[in-house]
Structure formats: structure tokens, C-alpha cells
Amino acid sequence: MKNSVPQLLLICIIAFYAEEVCSSIYRLNKRISNVEVKLDTVNTDIAAFRLDMIEVWDKMEEMNKSMCPTENPNHLMKPNVTVMETAVQAETHVSSRMLYSALQSEKKFVREHNQMLEENVNALAHGQKHIEVLVKKQSENIEKVVQDIKTLNNMSVFKAEHRKAIGKVVKDIETIDSKILVMEHAQEDTTENVKSLTENIKTTAKDIKTLDQKVKKIDQLERDVKTLKETLDTVMNQMSTMQQTINQIKARTPCLPRWYSYGQSCYYFSTSELSWSDALNDCKSKGVYLAEHKHRGEAKDLAELAQSISTKIDMYWVGASDISSEGSWIWKESHASVNYSYWTSGNPDNYRNEDCMSTYVNHQGHWNDLNCNTKIGYICQTAKLD
Ligand SMILES: [Ca+2]
Ligand SMILES: [Ca+2]
């Protein structure tokens, strides 16, 4: 664990006092060193003084010899260096003693100060131990708090998981509610369907009853159909017999009574006289058409046939006209162009707007254009009976 604030404070205080002690010791050593330097200086001065004294003595001796050559050079007293040294040493000793005394005082002060510092250090050490105990307790408390925080975190995680699980359960409940709602709707639909089915069954029962009645009617109808079929068979047999009779008649006469056979057709020569369009309609009402001449010989032969039946009519309408386009003659029934000429001389002359074709019985059946409103006989034509 990292240093706490009290520990750091304690370390700072110890460092401060250690710095103070070191400083005092340094100053003491400095002073001792100064004293030693001074002592060396004093010794040096004594040595120099001694040399100076010897030099002065030598000079004084030379002067004595030059000034008083007869005198005993020994009468001059050689200065007592030893005494002087002793004096100097005594003076130095006094100075040293004073200095020593000062140093002793200083040493005493330093010792006392050191002792006080030691006491302070001891007190601080005691305080440090107390602080360490407190720090230990605080660390334990912090550990406990950390543990509590972890527990709380775990509880938070547990709460989050619990909340998540609750959310899931809520969603499941919502899903179940939705399904229940859907099932309720389905049940309602089913009830409606059952009701509808019941109605359908009732309707179906009615329909079955109706069908049963219809089946009975069908049975009756089948019986009626059977009877009708028997009747039809009888009728068909009768028709077959009649057809045979008709065929026999046809074999004998290919045209109806009052119709005349020529080529592959039967012809009717009218006994009344009509306009060309009325004649056309009369033939149409009979299911036939106004006669057409396929070639000259046919017109001639039909004229002879008309003469032979003595209708007393000498002019008959046939089915060609140039009503649509003057001079362009078209057979009405077949829509074919009249592609050959069998006109009487000078015709067609379109005299007074003559647009319809007639045939002269007394002139070998030659054609003349007449006004369509002219009333004359007419010839109807149809195919022979099969
Ligand atoms: Ca004409
Ligand atoms: Ca004419």
C-alpha cells in the first residue's frame, strides 16, 4: 500500500531535524578546522619569529665585532629564544585554552542539542509507531470499505442481473398476454365460426331437404324423360318412315308441284305480275330467289319452257340489275357480274331509267332493260330436292 499523509509528514519532520543536526555538526567541524588552522599559523609565526631572532642576533654580533673588535664577542648576550618561545607558547596556550573552552561550550551545546534532537526523534519514532498503528487500522478500515464496495458492486451486479431477469420475465409475461389475447380472439373467431357453421348446417339441412325434393322431382322427370324418349323413338320411327316416303317422292319428282325441273334447278313461273323488287321479295318469301341465267342456252330453254306451260305472260323478271352502278349489271343472288350478252337489239338502252333485267319469252328469252317499277311476270329458282 502507498505511504499515507501522516507517514509522509513524519518523514518530512525527521528529515528536517536530521538536516538541522547535520548542519550543527558541520558548523562544529568548521570551527575545529579553523582552530587547527590558527594553531598552524601560530606555530608558523613562532618558527618565523625564531628565525628572525637568530638573524637579528647574527647582525648584532657582526656589528659588535666591527665596532668593538677587541671585546669578547661573547659579552653580548644571545637572546633567549626558548624563553621567548615559551612566552609565545604561553600566550598561544592561553589562546588555545580560551578557544578550547569555547569549543567545549560549543560541543556541550551541540551535545545538548543532539540530545534534544534524539529525544525529539524518539518522540517522533513513538509518534510514527502510533501513526503506523493508526495507518494500519485505517488500512484495515479501507480494506473493509473496499470489501464492502466490492460486496456492493457484487450486489449491484446481482441487482442488475436480477433487474434483467425481471425484465425478461416481464417480457415473457407480455408475450404470454399477447398470446392469450390472440387465443381469445381465435376463440371468439372459433365461436363465430361455430355459429356460422351451425347456421350453414341448418341451411345445408334445408338445402338437403330441398335437394331431396328435387331428387324426387328428378326421379319424376327421369320417368317423364323415359316416357318422352319412348315417344321420341316413336316419332323418330314415324319420321324415318316419312323420310323414306319423301325420298320415294323425290325420286319420282325432284321439284314441288307447279315447279318445273331444268338442269339442277326447279323453276316457278308466276301467274301474277309484280314490280322487280316485289318479285324479288315474293321469291324470297318462298325461300328461293329470282332466277339467274348461267348461259345463253339456259335463257332460251327457260323461254321455251314458259311457252309450253301457257301462262299467257310474255315478259318475266330475272334477277339482274344495274341499280348500283349504271351499265354494270350484277346477278342479285350470286353477286356475280353478267359476263355475257343476250340482250335484244338496241338494249340495254336505259330508256326512262331502266335498271332491271327482263326476258322475252316470245323472242327466245332475249333480255331487255325495263323500268323496275313495271309490273310483269317473274321466274323464281331453287335447287332440286335432295
Ligand atoms: Ca339502266
Ligand atoms: Ca330497254
Image (cartoon, rainbow, N blue to C red):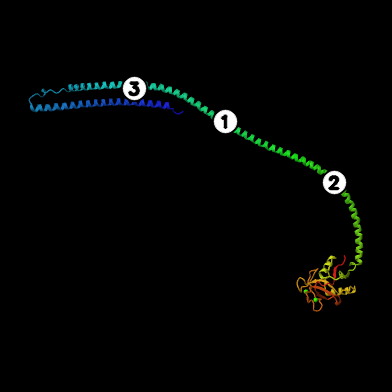
- Residue 103 placement (x, y as % from top left): 27, 22
User: Which amino acid type is marked by label 3?
Assistant: Asn
Q: Which residue is mark 3?
A: 114
Residue depicted at 47% across the width and 23% down the height: 137
Give SS at disc 3: helix
Name the one closer to the observer, 279 or 15: 279
Residue depicted at 14% across the width and 27% down the height: 56
Q: Which badge, 1 or 2, is on the more N-terminal residue?
A: 1
- Residue 4 placement (x, y as % from top left): 44, 27
Q: Which badge, 3 or 2, is on the more N-terminal residue?
A: 3
Judge from the rendering whether residue 5 lies leftward or rightward of residue 251; answer left or right: left
For label 1, being within 8 Å of ligand 1 is answered no
Judge from the rendering whether residue 108 lies leftward or rightward of residue 73; answer left or right: right
- Residue 298 placement (x, y as % from top left): 85, 73
User: Which amino acid type is marked by label 2?
Assistant: Val
Q: CA distance from mark 1 to mark 2?
A: 78 Å
Q: Which residue is mark 2?
A: 215
Give SS at disc 2: helix
Q: Quadrant of the rendered structure where residue 200 is?
A: top right
For disc 2, the neighbor class at 10 Å (few under 14, some 14 to 19, many from 20) is: some
Residue depicted at 88% across the width and 50% down the height: 224
Question: In this rendering, which labeled residue sits more in front, label 3 or label 2?
Answer: 2
Q: Which residue is mark 1?
A: 159
Give SS at disc 1: helix
